[in-house]
Image (cartoon, grey):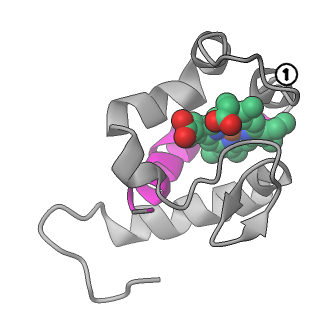
Amino acid sequence: MMAGAAGAQAPDPKKADAGQKVYVAQKCSVCHAIKNSGGKSASALGGVGAKLTEGDIRKWLTHTAEMESKVKPKPKMSMASYMKTHKLSDTDVDALVAFLISQK
Ligand code: HEC
């Protein structure tokens, strides 16, 4: 994806590729869609890199319950519950952040 098109502010493309693999392996698409592919029980992540800051994206992955508690109305499918059985390593989080911030 976007090979060779990395602009000055683009995240490390290797990290973003690794992040896409984590996204697939952790089945984030059970609830989220990117480019019309994936679930509809949570917001689509296709434009998340333009919507949220890098810091907020990271917080969604490291402090999921805290972030989710601010969502009104309360979501029917809980990402916080899901993440209890889908633990992310620090490397996974870094890669996912690079992948998601590149979704604009
Ligand atoms: C069980 C369903 C579910 C799964 C699986 C899930 N999420 Fe979520 N996610 C949610 C819900 C619910 C919200 C909060 C409400 C919303 O944004 O629709 C959310 C919010 C987010 C947000 C903030 C979106 C925004 O626009 O504000 C990000 C980023 C995110 N999730 C990333 C991920 C990643 C990465 C994975 C895989 C590791 C994942 N999610 C797996 C349900 C899920």
User: Which residue is rendered at x = 47% and y = 50% of the image?
Assistant: 48
User: Which residue is rendered at x = 66% and y = 10% of the image?
Assistant: 69
87 displayed left or right of 48: right
7 displayed left or right of 32: left
Residue 90 colored magenta? yes
Circle 1 Cα neighbour tier, 10 Å, few/some/many (<14 / 14–19 / ≥20)? few
* Secondary element at tag 1: helix
Instruction: Tell me if residue 65 comes above or below residue 50 in the rendering.
Output: above
Q: Is residue 87 visible?
A: no
Residue type at numbered disc 1 = Ser
Q: Quadrant of residue 82?
A: top right
User: Which residue is rendered at x = 17% and y = 74% of the image?
Assistant: 7
Q: Which stretch is magenta? A: 86-103
The residue at which mark 1 appears reads as: 81
Q: Nearer the viewer, residue 24 or 66?
A: 66
Q: Quadrant of residue 37?
A: bottom right
Q: Mark 1 CB in 8 Å range of ligand 1? A: yes
Question: Ligand 1 quadrant?
Answer: top right
